[in-house]
Image (cartoon, rainbow, N blue to C red):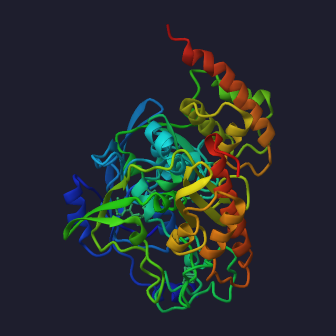
Amino acid sequence: MAQLKASLRPAPAPPPTPIPVTLNVNGVERTLHLAPWTTLLDALRLHLDLTGTKKGCDHGQCGACTVLVDGRRINSCLTLAAMQDGRKVTTIEGLTTGDALHPLQEAFIEHDAFQCGYCTPGQICSAAGLIAEGKASTDDEIRELMSGNLCRCGAYPNIVAAIRQAMATAAPKAEGAP
Amino acid sequence: MRSFTYARAASAADAVGRAGASGTAFVAGGTNLLDLMKADVLRPEGLVDISRLPLDRIEETAEGGLRLGALARNADTAYDERVQTRYPMLSKAILAGASAQLRNMATNGGNLLQRTRCYYFYDTATPCNKREPGSGCGAIGGVNRIHAILGASDRCIAVHPSDLCVALAALDAVVQVTGPDGERSIPFADFHRLPGDRPEIDTVLRPGDLVTAIDLPAKGFAEHSTYLKIRDRASYAFALVSVAAGLELDGGTVRDARLALGGVAHKPWRDPEAEAALVGKPATPDRFRAAARVLLRDAKGHEHNSFKIELAERAIVRALTEAAERKGAPRP
Ligand SMILES: Cc1cc2nc3c(=O)[nH]c(=O)nc-3n(C[C@H](O)[C@H](O)[C@H](O)COP(=O)(O)OP(=O)(O)OC[C@H]3O[C@@H](n4cnc5c(N)ncnc54)[C@H](O)[C@@H]3O)c2cc1C
Ligand code: SF4
């Protein structure tokens, strides 16, 4: 049956030659040769073994694949790796400094801001982007600007509390410049 | 995704040249195109990446308005200080759409050209005249809760899903295009089409046409305007009905009015008669309701979406009331 079905399909086009893509991932320059349709998410997970970034819906709806590109949060499933050539990508693996957790990671643990943990890397990268954007100050604003990250366990109240705490510790640093 | 080739455009002219080949599509933010390619709804053989063309600026125009680059990101447009102060309804509309991550990726040009979210358009196992001309319409007689109440045809009852475009329609924006036949300017009201008997065609763009910018006229209705979006949850959902409203008031009297609706038709819906019904009249809920009834006079519901007719009427009254009350205007 499978064979019959396969024979009814048009012959697949020959795969185009792989394209060279250079990404600076978490501070390390990596050059890959990728099929054009490789998303940034698949490049990270399948080609660089950085499996912290999760594939949830693969359609930009859940936010599990959120990473920072040149410091801005994006859905890595809806962009091609080739489109990000030459850019700086930060994933959950790149947020720690040595063995020290990022303040958001600390806050998520402290506030029990996850249950199964699948959405957490995306939540944390998204929250890092949100803090850098500086557009949220109230809980309602955090909720609104985090609405692109779904949590099927429903840890939302604790996620908001964790972000609020990390935001409070990040703020003096931002304004601390002499 | 199916196999395709990838090339980066070196300039706008290069992009237009490359797009001449059939089966080629521009990719900007990728948030709609790649989604539809994964769903096997769109099957381009080649992508021309325009995302790095220097069309990402927001600049003053000689006429006192703003030129929004086609490749400026939705987030950068919404948070631009000039947009926020001079065109607050536009900023609000953009921020009512998608998520922070998506707005960081999505471009203004791509937003104009995003496709409908009709369930059948996305589901390649079902008939859809927009996806597969002549195959029929799954939504007519199917599940049509999110579909059109105005301007639909017996071939297609899809709605245009953009929030940004509703504000652009209300503001009388102009779309700047460069293509194989040179450059042209398209008034926003003429940019998107009604489905008629060719629902597969969303806009008046021709193959190879590249949107380069969107121009906003000087008049931004900053004093009295709003964008109201009604959806199934508080955030991150497409509009069931949305309203971009702008008023120019002289005391309690309406001098000029703009009213555009989203979520109700194949294009952002404007109706000159409804706007005329407001001008010269007091800015009161009664008058707003009368204008809403003019706008909705030909509205037609389907099995699951008739609720949108009353929802639209109420949303119009509420949006105009909010717009009138802004900045300490005299209470009606
Ligand atoms: C989960 C989700 C939720 C969303 N919610 C909302 C919402 O609530 N409100 C809303 O308004 N939108 C919403 N969107 C849609 C989003 O706004 C669009 O996907 C986005 O604006 C498209 O822009 P882009 O640059 O990514 O376009 P792309 O995906 O790159 O391109 C889209 C189309 O436009 C064409 N194109 C792009 N740029 C040009 C140009 N300059 N000239 C000619 N053709 C061009 C491409 O060829 C393609 O056909 C949502 C999207 C997702 C995935
Ligand atoms: S409403 Fe339009 S897009 Fe939806 S199934 Fe019918 S033809 Fe297709």
Viewer-closest of B99 and B173: B173
Is residue B268 shown left or right of residue B15? Answer: right
Q: Residue at x 63, y 25 (%)?
A: A102
Is residue B180 shown left or right of residue B160? Answer: left
On screen, residue A46 above or below B200: above
Q: In which quarter of the image is residue A2?
A: bottom right
Q: Where is residue A16 in the image (x, y as percent from the top left)?
A: 31, 64
Viewer-closest of A94 and A155: A155
Q: Position of residue B179 (x, y in %)?
A: 23, 66
Quadrant of the picture in which ligand 2 is shown? bottom right
Q: Is residue B49 visible?
A: yes
Q: Which residue lies furthest to the top in this view?
A: A178
Q: Is residue A108 visible?
A: no
Q: Quadrant of residue B4?
A: bottom left
On screen, residue B185 above or below A26: below
Q: In which quarter of the image is residue B19?
A: bottom left
Viewer-closest of A174 and A114: A174
Q: How many marks?
A: 0
Q: Position of residue B263 (x, y in %)?
A: 60, 68
Q: Which residue is drawn at 63% across and 84% down?
A: B139
Viewer-closest of B321 and B210: B321
Q: Which residue is drawn at 36% across and 47% down?
A: B65
Q: Which residue is drawn at 56% across and 35% down?
A: A129
Q: Where is residue A109 in the image (x, y as percent from the top left)?
A: 76, 30
On screen, residue B20 above or below A123: below
